[in-house]
């Protein structure tokens, strides 16, 4: 019964994508595939029924969780760890590793090139689902990966190096269980310390400006409404609200604030006592220009003034604590190929620019991270049906990486990679985010006990 409870806890800690990954890795082990992927219980039941998993034989569970990089779950359930095992075939691990590196845009390109599989069978399929369809059609198997290499050559040629290493016979490093027992040693380099995250997580302030009708009173700056921002704020997809709530933050949302209200809000946050909190998160979603964001009245607020409200001089209770600002707005009108001026939007498209915002040029202060949705002088884009490219990618990668104990700077590097690969239907619009930070330690969020939220996937062909 204790082992059954442990499996139940494991299932609650896994996302839908992770359950699918476990099922995929077990394809060659089980005599039949689980009927549903709604949860892990179905998979674990089948493994136990076929005598592949039990309290006395937990090796497969250990290997599965290590393969998907969730060793922290093993710690949480206090499982007695056996010696390392290789119950999962290297071929399955190869395909899983490849799936983790394929972007949404590349997946779409793969589906387009797979003419040997009926289109209807590829709709809504994840990368692992596509691999299974390729196996069912006998297009790939452990001894024949040439078809996949041909696809990769057109879509993501760098992944063919993974296949080459696989053919050499030993591309995967087996994790030493004894080393893994000391999680601090194995997963955290000694050269860097982590910010303490032992108290209450802190406040997550969200300022989301949608309705800019008030800006028409200011004839100098007339701005369009920011269609699609509701998906970032959380009305439907619960992106920022759900993700930071899942991480343990007290989410405080403010909609359609003018310039003075934004400044007053940050002044009030800076005057609060944060001594019981570990950190502070602030998210601003608006139009902007370099160094500034717009209020809904069309007036500008300087980013550096908002930062000063929460620096060590004005907010002593946040000294030596990470202060994280995520700003979704443009830093100019330039598109990273070709230009669409601020305020001019094609009504037939679903991709819009948040022109114009911010380069961090204020004096350096400690323990600050500013995640900008784009580089200076350039536009930042929104999909009116899915939300902004940057915020959706940030939320998706926090959900994916936090349970793996990945630090925030590394997560933002992955966000850079993902967003830089996004484009619209015409494949003419591009975007490159830019984080800037004065952090002195790593920001590693504690792994939440609750199951990660499902916020939906933002496709990278935003047409």
Image (cartoon, grey):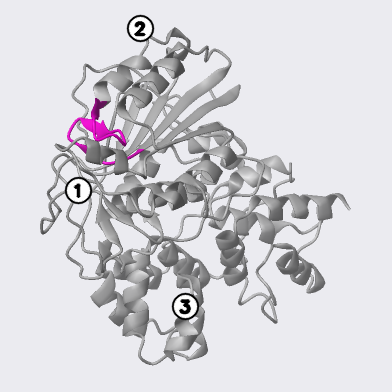
Splitting the image into 4 quarters, where does residue 200 fall? top right
Which residue shows up at 57% across the image and 34% down it? 446
- Residue 379 image label: 1
**Residue 15 or 261: which is nearer the viewer?**
261
Q: Is residue 167 magenta?
A: no
Query: What residue is disc 3 on?
Result: 131
- Residue 65 image label: none
Mark 1 to mark 2: distance in Å? Answer: 33 Å
Of the two numbered discs 1 and 3 on the same chain, state the one appearing first in sequence.
3
Query: In screen coordinates, is 168 left or right of 186?
Result: left
Query: In screen coordinates, is 447 left or right of 304?
Result: right
Task: Give the structural element (helix, strand or loop) at label 2.
Answer: loop
The stretch in magenta equals 285-302
Task: Give the structural element (helix, strand or loop) at label 1.
Answer: loop
Label 1: few (<14), some (14–19) or many (≥20) C-alpha neighbours in 10 Å? many
Judge whether residue 194 can be spotted in this image: no
Of the two numbered discs 1 and 2 on the same chain, state the one appearing first in sequence.
2
Query: What residue is disc 2 on?
Result: 313
Q: Is residue 296 magenta?
A: yes
* Label 1 close to label 2 by CB (< 8 Å): no
Label 2: few (<14), some (14–19) or many (≥20) C-alpha neighbours in 10 Å? few
């Amino acid at each position: 019964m204790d082992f059954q409870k442990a499996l139940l806890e494991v299932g609650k800690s896994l996302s839908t994508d992770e359950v699918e990954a476990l099922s995929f890795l077990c394809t060659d082990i089980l005599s039949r595939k689980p009927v549903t992927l709604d949860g892990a219980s179905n998979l674990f039941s089948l493994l136990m029924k076929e005598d592949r998993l039990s309290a006395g034989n937990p090796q497969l569970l250990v290997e599965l969780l290590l393969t998907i990089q969730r060793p922290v779950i093993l710690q949480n359930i206090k499982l007695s760890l056996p010696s390392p095992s290789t119950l999962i075939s290297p071929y399955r691990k190869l395909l899983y590793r490849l799936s983790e590196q394929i972007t949404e845009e590349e997946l779409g390109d793969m589906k387009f090139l797979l003419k040997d599989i009926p289109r209807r069978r590829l709709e809504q399929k994840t990368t692992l689902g596509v691999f299974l369809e390729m196996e069912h059609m006998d297009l790939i198997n452990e001894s024949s990966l040439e078809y996949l290499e041909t696809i990769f050559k057109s879509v993501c040629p760098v992944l063919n190096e993974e296949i080459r290493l696989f053919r050499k016979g030993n591309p995967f490093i087996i994790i030493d269980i004894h080393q893994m027992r000391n999680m601090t040693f194995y997963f955290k380099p000694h050269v860097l310390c982590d910010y303490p995250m032992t108290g209450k997580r802190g406040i997550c302030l969200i300022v989301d400006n949608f309705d800019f009708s008030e800006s028409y009173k200011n004839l100098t700056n007339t701005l369009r409404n920011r269609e699609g921002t509701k998906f970032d704020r959380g009305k439907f997809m619960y992106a920022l609200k759900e993700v930071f709530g899942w991480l343990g933050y007290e989410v405080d949302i403010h909609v359609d604030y003018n310039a003075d209200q934004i400044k007053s809000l940050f002044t009030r946050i800076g005057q609060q006592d944060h001594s019981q909190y570990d950190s502070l998160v602030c998210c601003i979603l608006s139009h902007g220009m370099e160094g500034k964001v717009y209020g809904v009245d069309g007036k500008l607020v300087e980013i550096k003034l908002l930062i000063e409200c929460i620096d060590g001089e004005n907010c002593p209770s946040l000294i030596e604590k990470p202060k994280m600002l995520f700003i979704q707005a443009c830093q100019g009108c330039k598109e990273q190929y070709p230009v669409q001026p601020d305020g001019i939007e094609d009504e037939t498209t679903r991709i819009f620019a948040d022109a114009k915002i911010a380069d961090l040029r204020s004096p350096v202060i400690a323990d600050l991270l500013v995640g900008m949705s784009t580089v200076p002088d350039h536009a930042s884009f929104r999909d009116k049906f899915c939300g902004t490219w940057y915020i959706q990618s940030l939320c998706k990668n926090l959900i994916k990486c936090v349970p793996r104990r990945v630090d925030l700077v590394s997560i933002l590097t992955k966000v850079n990679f993902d967003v830089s690969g996004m484009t619209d239907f015409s494949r003419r619009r591009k975007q490159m985010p830019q984080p800037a930070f004065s952090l002195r330690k790593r920001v590693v969020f504690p792994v939440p006990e609750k199951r990660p939220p499902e916020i939906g996937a933002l496709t990278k062909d935003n047409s």
